[in-house]
Image (tube, helix red, strand yellow):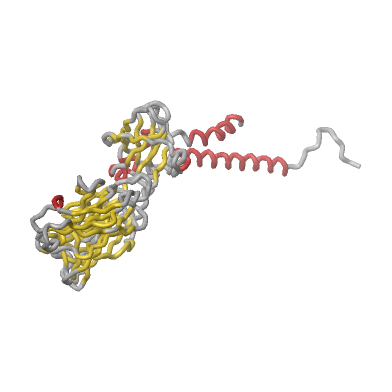
Amino acid sequence: MNAIIIFLLLAPSVAFAAERPADFAYGIPIEIDTRDALYEIELPAAVYRGVTRADIGDIRVFNGQGEVVPHAFRPPAQTIAAVSLPVFPLYGEANENLEDLSVRINKRGDGTIIDIQKRAKGSGPIGRLRGYLIDASSLKPAIAALRFDWDMASESFVGQVRVEGSDDIAAWTILADKAVLARLTFGGHHVERNRVDLRFAKFKYLRVSWPTSQAPLESLSAAAEPVANVIASRRVWETIAGSEIPGKKGEYSYDLSGHFPFDRLRVELPQVNSLVQLEILARATASEGWRHVTSATAYRLRDRDAEVKSQEIAISSRGERYWLLRADQKGGGVGSGVPAIQIGWVSQKLVFVARGDGPFQLAFGNAGTKPAAYPIESLIPGYKTDAEFKVKPATLGVPMTISGAARLRAAWNYKKLALWGSLIFGVMLLGWMAFRLSRQLAKPPTNPKGSDNST
């Protein structure tokens, strides 16, 4: 009986033995110098292809002794409301370089531009509108993108602009070149593209210009999309090829081969001068029904030397693996060929504690494990304050296979079986003991030998 009780006490601890790297399908070496306490890595696409959970909960960091070390996910940077910026026109002759424009810039002591005037070169006209100077000196955060508005002399416009940045209005850095701006009507639809991505640029002054052969942008106004003052992660894009569903005209399926946390979708139409209405659907497994995600208009139009493509579509993904485009066949659908899609997500950063000796390893892919990430506030002292603890970047090596794809299947969980088996055995044992005790209590007592019960 004592041996049975000891077994019951030990069974739970045996069932929940510590995790090891061999419990996971794949791994990636982590290279650090081990001089700091906290390190940070950017999760690559291989992780999203290898995990089994949409919340990437089946991911761990191990030290050189095969021990799990604490980790947390750093929240991505959040954008804040767009800010209107002062815009000043630049005039010059058609054959005059922007750097050679003779202008006088009046600024306050803090660098804010008050006025721009063209220096007189005789009594002739001030010249043609060549571009604009944008004052961003009062904006502290970096700029993720610029949104433009302008007056149009005709109903349709397609053009290209260059955006440059400078801190002294002398040396300029190209931030965006041949960025397309457009407003036009096509097939009864109104198409507008007025946003230029600057990839988190941080300059006091911006300059917008266009080719001399292009019609100028009259009365341009600009609004900046600042990035919140936290660590900004880059947006990663992955191209996914599709296939047409047999017997279903205008329906195209896509297998992402993983649980990607994307929030933007681009549709690459196969033919120029195409515009189509799309319904976008998704599902987690091949056996589920399709979930309507959103509807959108995709286009790919050419006007002279400029090509205008539809901008990315905001998507509310739940980590589904399978996606479907259903194209409206009015107007011929997408034409011949199969559209490709691009999925975009803000790269997720994982912070871990460098406890123990190296080498450290990122392991992922286990259908039977649960999330183990800590809240970021408990892992990084002073998070979201000026006294935030230093987190040093780490380098990832080449992905490798540990235990392979067998860990991705929902196999028998022997740890749970051992625990449940021990609990069931214990209940049966207690029931048998109770049964024996009840029988002993129900049995009538026997008289001692030779006793006399007569009165």
Relative depth, front residue between 174 and 265: 174
Query: Which residue is at the far right?
Result: 455
- Pick the front one: 52 or 423: 52
Residue that protrudes farthest toward the bottom in the picture: 188
282, above or below 7, in the image: below
Q: Residue furthest front?
A: 122
As drawn, 43 above or below 249: above
Foreground of the two, 360 or 424: 360
Q: Give the total of numbered labels.
A: 0
Residue 274 visible in rendering: yes
What quarter of the picture does the N terminus occupy?
Answer: top right
* Placement of 57 over or under 294, stated as above or below: above
Visible residue check, residue 272: no
Left or right relative to 59: residue 273: left
Tell me if 61 is positioned left or right of 117 in this view.
right
Task: Residue 124 in the image: state x and y as whole percent.
Answer: 11, 62
Task: State the residue at coordinates (49%, 33%).
Answer: 14
Q: Residue at x 26, y 51 (%)?
A: 205
Q: Is residue 153 left or right of residue 51?
A: left
Q: Quadrant of the C terminus?
A: top right
Residue 260 place in picture, x, y as percent: 31, 49
Q: Position of residue 105 (x, y in %)?
A: 24, 53
User: In this orientation, which residue lies closer to the viewer: 106 or 159?
Assistant: 106
Spot occupied by residue 110 in the image (x, y as percentages of width and height): 33, 49
